[in-house]
Image (tube, grey):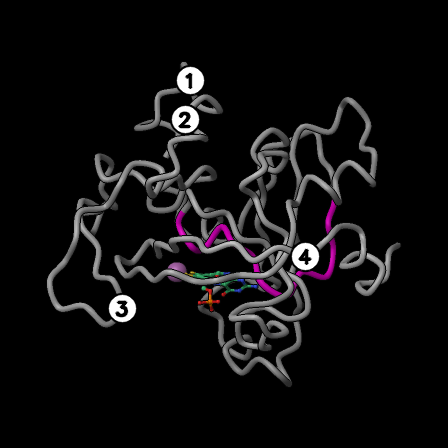
């Protein structure tokens, strides 16, 4: 067990300006505050059999009215493959716009995975666990044919109910083209040899 105050002191905070692309077709550019998730993982020193990281988030229907409904199975859970979580772009985040993270954006601690659809960027994390099997993330559990485990931003793989080729940047009128890996080509080697149409 590690206190959140101890976690955020593990490395120097950095401001990282990332594109954010929601699976539903909107996007935004956000200045986050945090440091690479790998800093925390290195401290935790996982066993070699740890192949994935699972993030469980806060279940508190008193504070979070959406959780009083059955739209999803709560708590919201997300997961990453270990090499994805160890990629320097994967951010452990506790602030935005130079301020402490607001509750609605995932206080006190969230992850930001800029090359994946926004739902992979779990907010208000209360538990991090290493696993040898691929974790079942909440959206995949709810509709596995629509939301995969990887969910890398990919303009060539449409959602079954809408195209992913374009996106609307909040505040803009015309749509702009969506970029492979949301423009973060640095991560491409994580997926070399994988069929990204199958592993969507
Ligand atoms: N715990 C939790 N994390 C979550 C979600 C959620 O419903 N619960 N929604 C996801 C989705 S779909 C998106 S697009 C981003 C939105 O982040 P923001 O609220 O900071 O804009 O959070 C993601 N993380
Ligand atoms: Mo989203």
- Kindly report which numbered mark, 3 or 4, lies closer to the viewer in this rendering: 4
In percent of the image, x 50 and y 47: which residue is there?
Answer: 113
Q: Is the residue marked 3 within 8 Å of ligand 1, measured from its CB?
A: no
Q: Which residue is mark 3?
A: 170
Q: Position of residue 176 (x, y in %)?
A: 16, 53
Mark 2 / mark 4, whichever is N-terminal: 4
Q: Which residue is mark 4?
A: 13
Residue toward you, 134 or 71 = 134
Q: Is residue 8 toward the left or the right of residue 95 in the image?
A: right
Q: Is the residue marked 4 within 8 Å of ligand 1, measured from its CB?
A: no
Q: Position of residue 13 (x, y in %)?
A: 68, 57
Q: Is residue 61 above or below residue 90?
A: below
Q: In the rendered structure, are the residues bearing label 2 and label 1 in contact, judged by CB atoms less than 8 Å apart?
A: yes
Quadrant position of residue 108: bottom right
- Kindly report which numbered mark, 1 or 4, lies closer to the viewer in this rendering: 4
Q: CA distance from mark 2 to mark 1?
A: 7 Å
Residue toward you, 72 or 166 = 166
In percent of the image, x 66 and y 40: which residue is there?
Answer: 53
Q: CA distance from mark 2 to mark 4?
A: 26 Å
Q: CA distance from mark 3 to mark 4?
A: 27 Å
């Amino acid at each position: 067990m590690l206190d959140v105050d101890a976690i955020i002191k593990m490395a120097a905070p950095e401001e990282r300006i990332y594109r954010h692309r929601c699976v539903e077709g909107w996007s935004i550019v956000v200045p986050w505050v945090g440091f690479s998730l790998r800093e925390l993982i290195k401290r935790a020193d996982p066993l070699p059999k740890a192949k994935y990281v699972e993030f469980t988030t806060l279940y508190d229907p008193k504070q979070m009215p959406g959780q009083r409904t059955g739209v999803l199975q709560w708590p919201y859970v997300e997961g990453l493959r270990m090499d994805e979580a160890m990629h320097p772009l994967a951010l452990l985040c506790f602030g935005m716009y130079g301020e402490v993270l607001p509750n609605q954006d995932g206080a006190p601690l969230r992850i930001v995975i800029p090359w994946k659809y926004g739902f992979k960027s779990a907010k208000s994390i209360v538990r991090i666990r290493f696993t040898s099997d691929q974790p079942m993330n909440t959206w995949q559990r709810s509709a596995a044919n629509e939301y995969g485990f990887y969910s890398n931003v990919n303009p060539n793989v449409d959602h079954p109910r809408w195209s992913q080729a374009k996106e609307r940047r909040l505040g803009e009128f015309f749509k702009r083209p969506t970029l492979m890996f949301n423009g973060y080509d640095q991560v491409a080697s994580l997926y070399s040899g994988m069929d990204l149409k199958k592993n969507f």
